Structures are given as structure tokens and as C-alpha cells.
């Protein structure tokens, strides 16, 4: 079973040289730490920056320089800053190659729910609806089951949707799965020490298992 | 053309109960702190505020929420404000949650003189309820209307008496698109410079969009999530 960093490490392997990548809040943010050295990747922050750098050294924080999670960051050489409309313009126009975000639920048709639990939690969708509606390459990073032990990979989402038919791949603490265009979660890899049986038990939606499922290499 | 006013109190003098305001900023970054303080002091009520976030409990728009000056918030993300969430869940506060890109582009549309935009954000979700959907080249788009705001209040780094503005780093965010969208736009700046000092090639908001400008003071620039690494 993977911890959060393990999930981030596995997702980092999906990033290719030359990619512009948008990382969501939470586990996706950690992915930045595992981008292989020498790989030319530019991170986009939807508050208006291409070229997110590492956290500043203590005492060098700049309140004017934050990421979409409102964390203090640095700006790399070659960066560009722009307003919020242009930021989502480049997202809508599919200039960003890969979007990695968290979710509360994903359905076997690629629907995603991530922004609201009616009557309990209303934080808002932020940029997630814009991202999932336009991005062609969306990976969801999340836990396979929620705190109550219920599967988050469902036949149909129960929570209000963020977007429809959009998630292409899911990486959880248990597995890597593709969401097939015709519907269903296709099991690609098992986390170290996790059996296919455990993944079956944790997946409520249609799980497709073909042949031997290899263990992840991280 | 001299648009300089003495300060925040004069800049907001005719903002009245029931008006719609745009407030620039993302999180606590790039907030018009001086004007927010003046609005709290003035005590105007029943406001509709268009702003990406609602501040935190004791900073930004959170200060106006605490005094119950806001009737309706139009935002994309309001997660860091407990008082906001309380007023929302209890029904005291009306909230329209708008996808962030839609929010920004509805401001932009107003500033570009366009009545509406078409965006795929929100298709198939509750955001689409009651809205016109148009299909272009096989894909559905929602029609979203340009915002109308009585006042837009923005924060810039530098500005001049003509109203030209330059922002700094990610404190730019929503400020330029909101500056373009107000019937009246107020800009508070960290430094008011002489006309001619700003390079025309480097101006982010042309002065034509700005009606009142002043040099703000005592900026706190609070950091919401201080993240650092060790040397």
C-alpha cells in the first residue's frame, strides 16, 4: 500500500519531457517533488503563473508570490505571470498538457465529484470545473476508499459533480487504473504488497481485470 | 487627467447599501486592504460582493462578513472562512459559486464589452442548471453572462494619476480583469508614481479603465499558508 508520497511518486512517472502541468491541491502538489531531474517541465498555477519554483527559504517568503493553494512559493527563471482570465484561457485552449487533481468520487464513466457535500461542506469548485471540462489528460490522485471505508470508485457518483466523462486515469494507495471510454475501471498496476482481491473489495464500480496485474515500480 | 483621491474614505464615499462590488485578489494575495477597511468603517450593508474568495475570519472580506455587511457572495472557493461557512449553511448568506475561470472570464467579458461567454466549465453539473447550452463542433458550452458591478476595487503595485496600473507577481490575479469591469473602478496602489514614470509598454491596466486612484498605507499583506524550506 502506498502513502501519499508514494501516490505522488507514481504519478510523477506519467509526466513527460516538455509538459506544462497543472497540479491541484493536496497529494497532487507533492508530485512536484518527484519530477525526475533533467526533465523539462513547467508547472502552471491557476492564480496566474507558469514556472512554480520550490518553497522559499525561511525569511525569504514573499506575500505577493503564492500558488493556487495559497502557499508561499518561489518563481523560477523563465517564468511568466498573467491574470486569472488568461490563466484559464490557456487551460480552456488545451495548452496545459496534464492536469492532476484530487477527488471525493470518480465514476466508471469518468465523472468526477470533488467540491461539495450537500449540507456539510461547501468549499467551492475553485478552478476544478474549468480544468476538468477542458483538459484532455486528467489524472486523479486520491485514496481508494473514504474515511468511512466506502469505495470512492463508483458506478455512479453520489455527490454533486465537478465534471462529466473526463477522468482518464486514477492513482490510489492501492492501484493504478484507467477509466475506459466505454466505461469501467481497468486495473493496470497493483501497489506493492496489495492483492487483486483487495482492490476488488475496495472498488464499487465496474472493475476490469485482464491477465496478470503487475506490481507498480516506483 | 488627474484621478487621484485623498485616500480610501474618499474613494468609496458614494458606495451605498445594496450595491454590487468586485474586489480583486486571490486568497489574501493582492487584496485592496485599505478600501476593505474603509468599507468596514463606513458600515455599508446588503452588498453583493464578487471576489474569488471570501478572505479568512479576520482578514479580507471576512471582516465585512463578520459585520454582516454582505448579502450575497459570488466566489469560486470559500474554504478558509469558518464564519462564511456558518452563514452559508444557516441560510443567512446567499452564495453563488462560480467556476474560477468562468468568474475571471465574466469579468473580462464586461471589460471587453461583450455580453456573454461560452465555456465548457460546469456542463453536466448543478452550475449548468437554468442556463443556455450551445453546441459548437460537437461539444457543449454554457452561456455565462458578463458581470455588472457598480464598483470594482482593485489593488496594484504601482500606478499614476492617469490611472495606469502595474501589478506585482501573483498579486496580479483577478485585479486586471476586475479593473476593466467596474462602472466605477477604484485602484489602491502601493506606490503612486509621477505620470511618465511607468513605461507604456509595461502597463497592465490602461488608465481609461480606472476612475479613482490613491496610494494606500499600512499594507499587512498577510500570508495564508507560510511554506518554507530549510537553508
Image: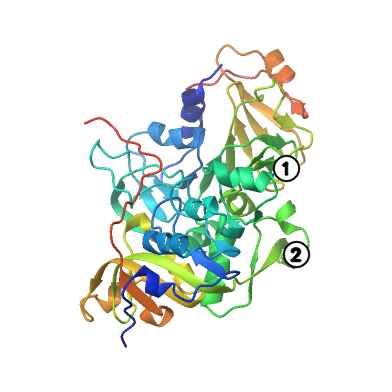
Q: Residues within 10 Å of mark 1 (few under 14, many from 20)?
A: some
Residue B35 x, y percent position in the rendering = 41, 64
- Residue B170, percent from left and from top: 37, 55
**Residue B10, image x and y in percent?**
38, 74
Residue A118 x %, y % = 72, 41
Q: Residue at x 73, y 42 (%)?
A: A181
Q: In this rendering, is residue A141 above or below B199?
A: above
Q: Chain of mark 1?
A: A
Q: Residue at x 59, y 71 (%)?
A: B147
Label number found at residue B217: none
Q: Residue at x 48, y 70 (%)?
A: B152
- Looking at the image, which is closer to me, A167 or B159? B159
Q: Residues within 10 Å of mark 2 (few under 14, many from 20)?
A: few
Disc 2 and disc 1 in contact, CB within 8 angstroms:
no
Q: CA distance from mark 2 to mark 1?
A: 27 Å
| 2 and 1 marks on the same chain | no
Seen from the viewer's position, the closer of residues A168 and B44 is B44
Q: Does residue A208 appear anywhere in the picture?
A: yes
Q: Which residue is mark 2?
A: B131
- As drawn, which residue projects farthest toward the bottom? B1
Q: Is residue B90 left or right of residue A15?
A: right
Left-right relation of B18 to B157: right
Comparing labels 2 and 1, the label whose residue is closer to the camera: 2
- Secondary structure of residue under mark 2: loop
> Measuring 50% from the left and 59% from the top, which residue is drawn there?
A90
> Is disc 1 placed on a helix, strand or loop?
loop
Can you identify the residue that label 1 sits on?
A181
Which image quarter is the N terminus of chain A in? Answer: top right
Amino acid at each position: 500500500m502506498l502513502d501519499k508520497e508514494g501516490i505522488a511518486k507514481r504519478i510523477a512517472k506519467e509526466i513527460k519531457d516538455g509538459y506544462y502541468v497543472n497540479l491541484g491541491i493536496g497529494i497532487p502538489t507533492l508530485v512536484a517533488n518527484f519530477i525526475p531531474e533533467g526533465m523539462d517541465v513547467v508547472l502552471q498555477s491557476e492564480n496566474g503563473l507558469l514556472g512554480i519554483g520550490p518553497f522559499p527559504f525561511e525569511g525569504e517568503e514573499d506575500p505577493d508570490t503564492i500558488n493556487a493553494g495559497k502557499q508561499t512559493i518561489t518563481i523560477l527563471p523563465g517564468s511568466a505571470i498573467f491574470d486569472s482570465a488568461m490563466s484559464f484561457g490557456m487551460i480552456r485552449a488545451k495548452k496545459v498538457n496534464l492536469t492532476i487533481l484530487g477527488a471525493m468520487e470518480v465514476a466508471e464513466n469518468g465523472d468526477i465529484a470533488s467540491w461539495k457535500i450537500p449540507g456539510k461542506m461547501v468549499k467551492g469548485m475553485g478552478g476544478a470545473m474549468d480544468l476538468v471540462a477542458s483538459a484532455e489528460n486528467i489524472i486523479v490522485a486520491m485514496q481508494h476508499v473514504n474515511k468511512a471505508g466506502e469505495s470512492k470508485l463508483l458506478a455512479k457518483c453520489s455527490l454533486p459533480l465537478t465534471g462529466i466523462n473526463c477522468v482518464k486515469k486514477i492513482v490510489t494507495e492501492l492501484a493504478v487504473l484507467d477509466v475506459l471510454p466505454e466505461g469501467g475501471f481497468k486495473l493496470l498496476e497493483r501497489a506493492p504488497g496489495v492483492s487483486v482481491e483487495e482492490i476488488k473489495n475496495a472498488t464499487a464500480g465496474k472493475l476490469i481485470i485482464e491477465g496478470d496485474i503487475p506490481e507498480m515500480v516506483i | 487627467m488627474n484621478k487621484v483621491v485623498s485616500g480610501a474614505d474618499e474613494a468609496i464615499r458614494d458606495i451605498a447599501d445594496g450595491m454590487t462590488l468586485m474586489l480583486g485578489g486571490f486568497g489574501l494575495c493582492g487584496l485592496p486592504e485599505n478600501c476593505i477597511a474603509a468599507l468596514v468603517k463606513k458600515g455599508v450593508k446588503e452588498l453583493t460582493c464578487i471576489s474569488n474568495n471570501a478572505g479568512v475570519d479576520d482578514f479580507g472580506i471576512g471582516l465585512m462578513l463578520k459585520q454582516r455587511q454582505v448579502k450575497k457572495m459570488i466566489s469560486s472557493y470559500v474554504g478558509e472562512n469558518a464564519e462564511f461557512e456558518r452563514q452559508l449553511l444557516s441560510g443567512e448568506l446567499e452564495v453563488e459559486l462560480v467556476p474560477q475561470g468562468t468568474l475571471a472570464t465574466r469579468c473580462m467579458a464586461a471589460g471587453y464589452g461583450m455580453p456573454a461567454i461560452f465555456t465548457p466549465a460546469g456542463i453536466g453539473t448543478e452550475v449548468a442548471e437554468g442556463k443556455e447550452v450551445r453546441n459548437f463542433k460537437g461539444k457543449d458550452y454554457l452561456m455565462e453572462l458578463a458581470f455588472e458591478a457598480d464598483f470594482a476595487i482593485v489593488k496594484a503595485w504601482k500606478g499614476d494619476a492617469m490611472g495606469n496600473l502595474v501589478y506585482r507577481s501573483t498579486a496580479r490575479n483577478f485585479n486586471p480583469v476586475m479593473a476593466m469591469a467596474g462602472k466605477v473602478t477604484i485602484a489602491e496602489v502601493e506606490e503612486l508614481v509621477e505620470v511618465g514614470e511607468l513605461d507604456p509598454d509595461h502597463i497592465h491596466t490602461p488608465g481609461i479603465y480606472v476612475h479613482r486612484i490613491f496610494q494606500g498605507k499600512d499594507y499587512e499583506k498577510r500570508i495564508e499558508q507560510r511554506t518554507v524550506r530549510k537553508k
